[in-house]
Image (cartoon, rainbow, N blue to C red):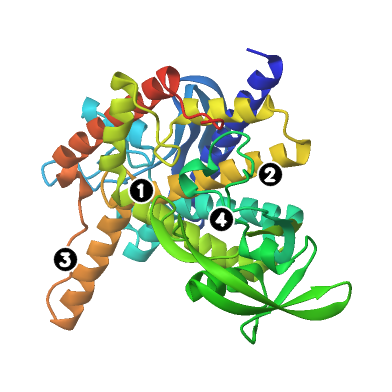
Amino acid sequence: MSWVYLAGFLLLFVGLMVSIALHEIGHLVPAKIFGVRVTQYMVGFGGTFWSRRRGETEYGVKHIPLGGYIRMIGMLPPRASDDPNKLRSVSTGPWQSLIENARAVASEEIRPGDENRVFYRKPWWQKVIIMAGGPFMNFLLAFVLFAVVMMGFGVLVQKPVLSVVNRCVIPVAQAQEPERECRPSDPLTPAAKAGLLPKDRIVAVDGTRVGGWEAAQKMIRDHGAGPATLVVERGGRELTVGVELIAQDRPDLQDPDKLVKVGFLGVQPTQVMERQGPGYVISEMWEMTRRTAVAMVDIPHKMVGVWNAAFSGEKRDPNGPIGVVGAGRIGGEIAASSAPLENKIIFFINLLAGLNLAVGMFNLIPLLPLDGGHIAGGLWEGLKRAWARITRRPTPGYVDVAKLLPLTYAMALVLLFMGGLLIFADIVNPIRLSG
């Protein structure tokens, strides 16, 4: 293992730990704003490696850097049979919460003056804001990191300027063969027959002007086989060129694994890095969030693939789940690659942004011990109280999410199993950039 690979691994790992620390700050800041007493802010879990007390809060780092949490007093209301001056202890981190619940003996004394500083007595909307603060911080980090790439470095954009005019038509089944070149028996492409040249800019297709490559490509594909008219700009002049398009089996733009018969010209566009504006970042962030949400629904099926890869040697799905070890290995692989430094930086930032987006979405799943379970509890309490006001009934008591502890234990075991399986698969059969 080269030092460059190790540096890449550690760099990504540190980035993840910083993301976790900021996630917990997303809980910490609104908790303090709303007056909840926070006794601990920790990165990691297990024994304490280092800590310092500032005011009423202890800030520190634990020995096992695979998570984080803040401890707020009174996250769970006391049971009816309990001493009202003692509260059950729980924290925001799923692993730390699991440990505390398993002990089932931890309790916190309410100090004089803290009666209204406990979490469970806060209005439901404050509870929701506090618990949503962590995932929100992940989304914010993802947006900022994606913005750095898209607005600072730019994104690869295809222009309707021809970079390559293919000479012959190569069947799709042979297109992936290494160093496959044109043979005398291969027919000429429509572009070659029509005399199109590299650096020609496609201006219009069948009389309709196009603003970009995507529009030109769609019109050519949708045209199918038959005569078509192109207007191209060459040397500052616009030329009208007649072409005889052919029909070819090509990958579907929406589903690359599916072949569809479309109109074929035989050219490749020019690709350039182009900086984008905030609107583009927002649009892309929305689309990536949508795709991540869809992927979350498919996690059980994806984990079957991870199991098969870990124990049956099947190839890992490059778009499947990945753990901390796997992400670090990818970071090391890209650091040790021969790619230009700028490309490495872009990759690291995009990978860290994508991981933050996934962590934020995962934590919104409405099940304990995830943040989403507490958010769901707060929303349920708000609905119950709103219904009581509408129907003029007595105000209901606080929602006790601890009643879902059996489900919490089951969910925690699933999370532990998934985390262990991902780590094992990332070691024995990792996802590799080279495929």
Q: Mark 3 or mark 4, which has the lower sequence index? A: 4
Relative to 235, 231 lies left or right: left
Q: Which residue is mark 2?
A: 346
Q: Are marks 1 and 3 in contact (CB under 8 Å)?
A: no
Q: Mark 2 or mark 4, which has the lower sequence index? A: 4
Q: Mark 1 or mark 4, which has the lower sequence index? A: 4
Q: Residue at x 68, y 54 (%)?
A: 167
Q: Which residue is mark 1?
A: 371
Query: Farthest residue toward the bottom?
Result: 207
Q: Which residue is mark 4?
A: 140
Mark pair 2, 4: CA separation: 18 Å
Relative to 52, 250 lies left or right: left
Q: Is residue 53 above or below residue 364?
A: above
Q: Mark 1 or mark 2, which has the lower sequence index? A: 2
Relative to 260, 89 lies left or right: left
| Disc 3 element | loop
Q: Nearer the viewer, mark 2 or mark 4?
A: 2
| Disc 1 element | helix
Mark 2 Cα shell of 10 Å, populated few (<14), some (14-19), many (≥20): some
Mark pair 3, 2: CA separation: 52 Å
Q: Which residue is mark 3?
A: 396
Q: Nearer the viewer, mark 3 or mark 2?
A: 2
The quarter of the picture where residue 417 lies is: top left
Mark pair 1, 2: CA separation: 30 Å
Q: Which mark is residue 319?
A: none
Q: Mark 3 or mark 2, which has the lower sequence index? A: 2
Q: Residue at x 43, y 34 (%)?
A: 322
Q: Position of residue 1 (x, y in %)?
A: 62, 12
Query: Farthest residue toward the top?
Result: 1
